[in-house]
């Protein structure tokens, strides 16, 4: 018992108890043999076979790595139904079979052992990396499109009508409510066209919302090598989808800061106050200023493992939307030239 504890093959049961007369479970046997071998050999740990066991959830957390190794090395096989029964006591026949296979594994490891010092305190460095798609998510995004001809410019005052709908979609429940408010705004500001007549004689920058799938990719290590003894091993990452382990850290990406859009009339007009009194407004005069909000996106910058503090920095590998074009003038919609993303209609904005 003292030798096993000193060589860290067993750790006891906690509360200063060793349990010398307790039966040994199958997962305890796997851990003891795993601890014994890993002192002198580099072991391959894979969860491929363990994941196929119907009772894999029964494996204790402290025995998980050992059970991955034991199943991958065929030290332990499931019963007729594939169950591993990790917390069941091992029979004498099972122990005999396990030790027979253990000796075969040890002999094979010794035969293929590299000519390096025993007990190397490995210092690993990455020797091979691979770009991996870490995860994807469907999000509402904002895109700044420059120098486009949106066909939604009021020819009375120059207001970008579509942009006004985008800016105010949180202020109205339906597109009908927003349209009514837009018409009233046209009367209040003195727009001679009432904010309803459109043309496409203006090229301008515009911020539009889109729904897209963002794919985050990262350059991850796949092979590591010890700088002291030259031993190599495959590098594997824990399940990224487990949000109990990997925490997303996001960064704020400003698509466009807040800005003011100056509106002008193109012809002589009159502006009316709340009492119906008219004020003459000459063509080319400033009639109002529309304030636009600041648009932001939150993008995942890196994932952090709460157990190891390991960080995986990720980048967006999906379409960057280099240019939008109005390929169907009758719909007023803009389409990305590289992917199926399309600008939503005013009706879709309020759904």
Image: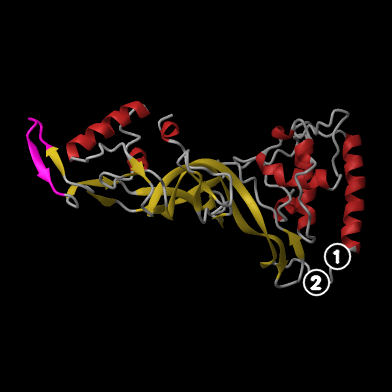
Q: Are marks 1 and 2 in contact (CB under 8 Å)?
A: yes
The residue carrying mark 1 is: 113
- Between residue 197 and residue 126, name the one nearer to us: 197
In this rendering, position of residue 12 left or right of residue 331 = right
In the rendered image, is residue 120 in sight? yes
Does residue 348 sit above or below 296 in this rendering? Answer: above
> Where is residue 170 shown, x and y percent of the image?
34, 34
> Where is residue 94 shown, x and y percent of the image?
88, 36
In this rendering, position of residue 20 left or right of residue 310 = right
Q: Indicate the quadrant where residue 278 lies.
A: top left
Residue at the image position 76 percent from the left and 71 percent from the top: 230
Residue at the image position 75 percent from the left and 71 percent from the top: 229
Q: SS of the residue at dot 2? A: loop
Count up the numbered dots: 2
Q: Is residue 255 a member of the stretch shown in magenta?
A: no
Colour style of the rendered protein structure: secondary structure
Q: SS of the residue at dot 1? A: loop
Where does the magenta region start and end?
272-282
Does residue 79 sit above or below 310 in this rendering? Answer: above
The residue carrying mark 2 is: 116
> Where is residue 150 shown, x and y percent of the image?
41, 47
Residue at the image position 31 percent from the left and 27 percent from the top: 177
- Between residue 96 and residue 53, name the one nearer to us: 53
Label 1, label 2: how far apart the Cα atoms are = 8 Å
Q: Residues within 10 Å of mark 2 (few under 14, many from 20)?
A: few
Image quarter where the C terminus lies is top left
Q: Residues within 10 Å of mark 1 (few under 14, many from 20)?
A: some
* Residue 315 image label: none
In this rendering, position of residue 142 left or right of residue 33 = left
In the rendered image, is residue 24 in sight? no
């Amino acid at each position: 018992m003292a030798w096993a504890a000193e060589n860290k093959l067993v750790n006891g049961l906690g509360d200063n108890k060793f349990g010398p007369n307790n039966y040994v479970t199958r997962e305890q046997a796997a851990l003891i043999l795993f601890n014994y071998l890993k002192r002198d050999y580099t072991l391959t740990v894979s969860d491929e076979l363990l994941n196929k066991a119907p009772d894999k959830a029964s494996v204790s957390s402290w025995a998980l790595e050992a059970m991955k190794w034991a199943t991958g090395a065929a030290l332990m096989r499931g019963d007729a139904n594939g169950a591993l029964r990790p917390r069941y006591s091992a029979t004498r026949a099972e122990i005999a079979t396990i030790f027979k296979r253990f000796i075969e594994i040890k002999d094979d490891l010794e035969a293929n052992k590299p000519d390096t010092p025993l007990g190397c305190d490995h210092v690993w460095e990455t020797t091979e990396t691979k770009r991996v798609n870490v995860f994807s998510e469907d999000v509402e995004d904002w895109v700044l499109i420059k120098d486009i001809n949106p066909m939604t410019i009021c020819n009375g005052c120059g207001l970008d009508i579509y942009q006004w709908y985008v800016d105010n979609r949180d202020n109205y429940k339906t597109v009908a409510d927003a349209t009514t408010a837009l018409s009233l705004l046209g009367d209040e500001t003195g727009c001679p066209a009432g904010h309803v007549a459109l043309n496409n004689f203006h090229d301008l920058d515009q911020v539009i919302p889109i729904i897209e799938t963002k794919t985050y990719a990262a350059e991850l290590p796949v092979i590591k090598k010890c700088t002291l003894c030259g031993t190599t091993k495959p590098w594997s990452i824990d399940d990224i989808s487990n949000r109990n382990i990997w925490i997303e850290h996001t960064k704020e990406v400003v698509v466009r800061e807040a800005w003011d859009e100056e509106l002008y009339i193109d012809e002589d007009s009159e502006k009316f106050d709340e009492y119906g009194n008219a004020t003459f407004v000459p063509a080319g005069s400033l009639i109002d200023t529309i304030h636009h909000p600041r648009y932001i996106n939150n993008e995942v910058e890196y994932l952090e493992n709460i157990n190891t503090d390991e960080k995986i920095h990720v980048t967006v590998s999906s379409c960057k939307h280099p240019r939008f074009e109005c390929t169907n003038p009758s719909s007023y919609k803009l389409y990305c030239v590289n992917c199926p993303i399309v600008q939503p209609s005013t009706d879709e904005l309020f759904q």
